[in-house]
Image (cartoon, rainbow, N blue to C red):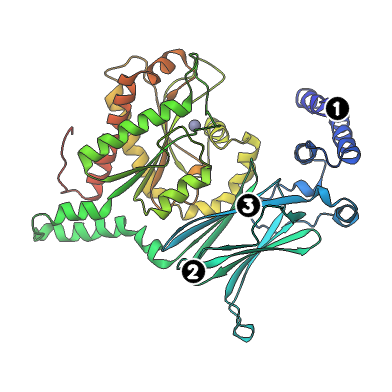
Amino acid sequence: MKARLYAELYGFSGKKKDKQRALDYYKSLLKRFPGSRYTSKAKRAITKLGGGHPSASKSITAVPVKKPTFNKKRSNSKPRSLAEVKEIRFWSSPSYTRVVIEVESEVPYTHRLLKKDPTIAKPMRLCIDLNHARIGHGLKPVVPIADDLLSGVRAAQNSPNTVRLVLDIKSIDDYKIFSLRNPFRIVVDVSSVSMMSASKTTSKKRFKHEQEKPGGKIPKGALAKQLALGVKRIVIDPGHGGKDPGAIGYLKGVREKNVTLEISRRLAKKIRQRLGCEVLLTRNSDTFLSLEERTAIANTKNADLFISIHTNANRAMACRGIETYFLNLATDEDAILVAARENATSAKNISDLQTIFSDLMKNAMINESSRLAGYVQESLIRKLKPKYKWIKDKGVKKAPFYVLLGAKMPCILIETAFITNPRECRRLNSAEYQEDVADAIAIGLQRYIKEIHPAAPIKAHL
Ligand SMILES: [Zn+2]
């Protein structure tokens, strides 16, 4: 508490003396109570204050990490301070698999791809070394996956303070690795070519269609078929849920997790009715889902579009409006704050992550997602503005949302209104507004799909 107060004070005063006192208290906590449940908090705080505590590295991908300098001295005498590797989870489909490794607290890690070695009959392997970590009590040392991409994952204590995870590879064409916080976990996405080409079909088809159009030789029904081929499955993701209530509304008892589920259910119904697409919800009850699980569902179900539904929040009650996001580097301060809240992390962290994420985001179908966001945002404003007073168009924005990270299809996140604004909270809580929002999103999706397939039959409401 003392350390935190001094850290907070330093935030206001900017005096080195205050920062030093905060660091001193945090460090004394680590020294005197190495087994305390506050150690990881203290380590994080020290790093944040620039106290150079090595075990709390901020690195989030496998960028080479400076070796912890105090490891040798400490880890032998106090092995309890090593972070436990707690669980290995995975979601699998024929051409895409996501493996998630959950660790007790943040640790530095490195990875490398090892080629097939016929001399020792070893397949291609992806090795991930977690420094300053140990195998947790409940961790299964071998997790069989046995899909087309991976045979499984193995975990072992490679040295007194290093856990090595090995993904035994059958056949992959691409992999991505990144980490998330609270709790700390490392996410590995592997995919094969068939998946990657599938994700590019929309643009290819569009080009093909435009070429064929002048001849008009396409038989009847073929276009509907094309439409069906283009977007046949949409995953809707109601934000938050279960132990994570999301933003708390201005009105008593109104919570983001309930509003997003209501809007998502209505949206699902409308899409089924009008577009004839298959619709899946990442959750259809008040249950908790991790951010990485949401995109894992969309990827393993081979969804063609991913729509995450949220409500915005701000300390200033007067804040209001509607905005639609796609995954990219954030360029404005407000977008960073929204991403920080939805990612359950700090704005500072988002800024730190931007450069590291840039590589991941190049492959995230940014252009398609931004077009989709444009259609949906425009439709929301066009539908709601004539009916409701004070509708504010905050436009299409970009920010690094974890929930969209690694999605293999166009994906957007909609902030449907501010739950912290009295008027908008009342609206979000009403069936009428929920219905109108769902309607507007469905129309936006319809227009987007129609634009990919210009001659596709559109059923209604255009
Ligand atoms: Zn949210």
Q: Is residue 4 left or right of residue 428?
A: right
Looking at the image, residue 326 lies above or below residue 14: below
Kind of residue at badge 3: Glu
Kind of residue at badge 2: Ile
Q: Residue at x 30, y 25 (%)?
A: 435
Q: Is residue 219 left or right of residue 291?
A: left
Rate crowding at label 3 as few (under 14), some (14 to 19) or many (20 or more) other CA atoms within 10 Å. some
Q: Which picture quadrant has residue 53?
A: top right
Q: Is residue 19 left or right of residue 282?
A: right
Which circle marks residue 172 in the picture? 2
Which marked residue is nearer to the observer: mark 1 or mark 2?
A: 2
Which circle marks residue 87 in the picture? 3
Across and down, in percent, residue 207 comes to: 25, 58
Q: Residue at x 67, y 57 (%)?
A: 63
Q: Which picture quadrant has residue 164?
A: bottom right
Rate crowding at label 2 as few (under 14), some (14 to 19) or many (20 or more) other CA atoms within 10 Å. some
- The mark total stands at 3
Across and down, in percent, residue 294 comes to: 47, 45
Looking at the image, residue 9 lies above or below residue 208: above
> From where the camera sits, is residue 400 visible?
no
Between discs 1 and 3, the one toward the N terminus: 1
Q: Secondary structure at mark 1?
A: helix
Position of the N terminus, as image quadrant, is top right
Rate crowding at label 1 as few (under 14), some (14 to 19) or many (20 or more) other CA atoms within 10 Å. many
Across and down, in percent, residue 126 comes to: 60, 67
Which circle marks residue 18 in the picture? 1
Looking at the image, residue 402 lies above or below residue 130: above
Which marked residue is nearer to the observer: mark 2 or mark 3?
A: 3
Between discs 2 and 3, the one toward the N terminus: 3
* Relative depth, front residue between 263 and 213: 263
